[in-house]
Image: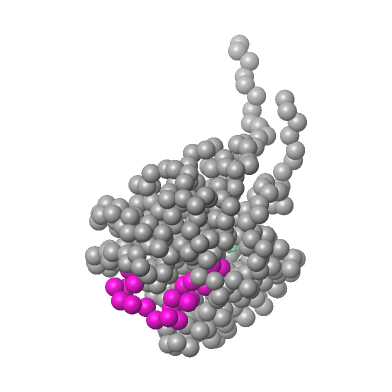
Amino acid sequence: MTEVQAFPDGLEGVVAAHTVLSEVDGQAGRLIIRGRSLDDLAGRARFEDLVALLFDGFFADLPADLTQALGQARAEVFAEAAYLDDRLAARDPVEAVRALTARLADGDDLPTALRLLAAPAVFTPAVVRAQAGKAPVAPDPSLPHAADILRMLRDAAPAQAEIDGLDAYLVTVSDHGLNASTFAARVVASTRAGLTSAVLAGISALKGPLHGGAPGPVIEMLDGIGSPQNARPWIEAALARGERLMGFGHRIYRVRDPRADALKGPVRALAAAGAGQAGRVEFAEAVEAAALAILKDHKPDRPLDTNVEFYTALLLEALAFPPSAFTCVFAMGRTAGWLAHAREQLAGGRLIRPQSVYVGPEPRQAA
Ligand code: COA
């Protein structure tokens, strides 16, 4: 029998890939994406710039400006929105978006990758509109990606502050080391199944509330708390029931998640531009302060700080995405990272095939 090594629960601390794509420094609270610090990117780069940064060297014939190519890809995948029937539209939006994405052909080339980037951007507005009894709005391939997503959602031109807010969000969540969905995408890519299969694995992993499914429940928490005075009793009661506070804690960060700060500026800018409910940000900040103080007493040995999902919830709420679709918006950004990781895995990696330790019973001897 091959010698096996003991492994920590949840593979915590295990290194399973070498990557040039991003580094998450959990002690310093720093995120680097292809040699650029997140502080330098969020609020400055558009989503198209981030895709170009992540895809550079992983796809041949990458155009310098991806705006037109992504617009064309949105127009192509829109044909699949015709398969959004009532049964599919009644499902959790991430399941509906995943099902429509599964209609796209597998492949390893740039056109396949661009269609996969376009898929959640086009299908999410279509699903949200279908759930409200409205027809889908066709993409406008001439628009930048973030502007067109908001236009398809509302059938009206968004304000510049809203486009900037969505761009900042998509850039901030585009890649983040070997998180659960990226690992799932790399495992599938390592089997040479194709980029569509890898992205579908990513979406499936992202769906869970311990990963990309947290921001919807953050809104439920804020609505449940209702007023700043109720923050402490509500949070204490939730923890006493053994619940986790959504939007707090992280496997890698032992300090504040830098993505929370990258989103705080755009959240405030949106509020200043009049988007979302008046006073919502101040209320959320009061809840955050109470949660951090209580978590410190609750788990003195485990630093639990604000993660990306807390401000994600506020930002996507201000952009008028329904909480049930927040994970789909996360997928719009993270698909860029999944695709780059899949190509990196294909370029150099072997089949990912770890071992397990059998702890079940030995076969019975025949009498
Ligand atoms: N609220 C309350 N307690 C929390 C907590 C939270 N958000 N996050 C972790 N803890 C507690 C755990 O219950 C655990 O306590 P225990 O030792 O008594 O069981 C302890 O802190 C250590 O947590 P652990 O499960 O080892 O952390 P992890 O690295 O596996 O989990 C998360 C990381 C993100 C899954 C976890 O912090 C979490 O569930 N957060 C809420 C969901 C969320 O916001 N997800 C988005 C992540 S970007």
Q: Position of residue 313 (x, y in %)?
A: 49, 72
Q: Residue at x 40, y 63 (%)?
A: 68
Quarter of the image for the N terminus: give it: top right
Rendered position, 209 above or below 105: below
What is the basis of the colouring in this image? one colour
Q: Where does the image place residue 116, in percent across and percent down from the top left?
A: 43, 53
Residue 164: give x, y in percent of width and height.
Answer: 48, 77
Residue at position x 59%, y 71% in the image: 41
Give me the residue at 54% from left, 43% from top. Answer: 189
In depth, the one of 318 and 245 nearer the eye is 318
Say if 79 sits above or below 257 in the image. Answer: above
Ligand 1 is found in which quarter of the picture? Answer: bottom right
**Residue under the point 48% across and 76% down:** 165
Q: Quadrant of residue 324?
A: bottom left
Q: Is residue 103 left or right of residue 309?
A: left
Q: Nearer the viewer, residue 42 or 29?
A: 42
Count of numbered labels shown in the rendering: 0
Question: Left or right: 329 with respect to 306?
Answer: left
Most prominent secondary structure in the magenta stretch? Answer: helix
Nearer to the camera, 278 or 39: 39
The quadrant in which residue 287 appears is bottom right
In the rendered image, the vertical position of residue 105 relative to residue 315, given as above or below: above
Query: Viewed as shown, does residue 210 lie left or right of 122?
Result: right
Segment tinted magenta in the rendering: 151-172
Q: Is residue 8 magenta?
A: no
> Is residue 67 something that shows in the picture?
yes
Visible residue check, residue 187? no
To which quarter of the image does residue 161 belong?
A: bottom left
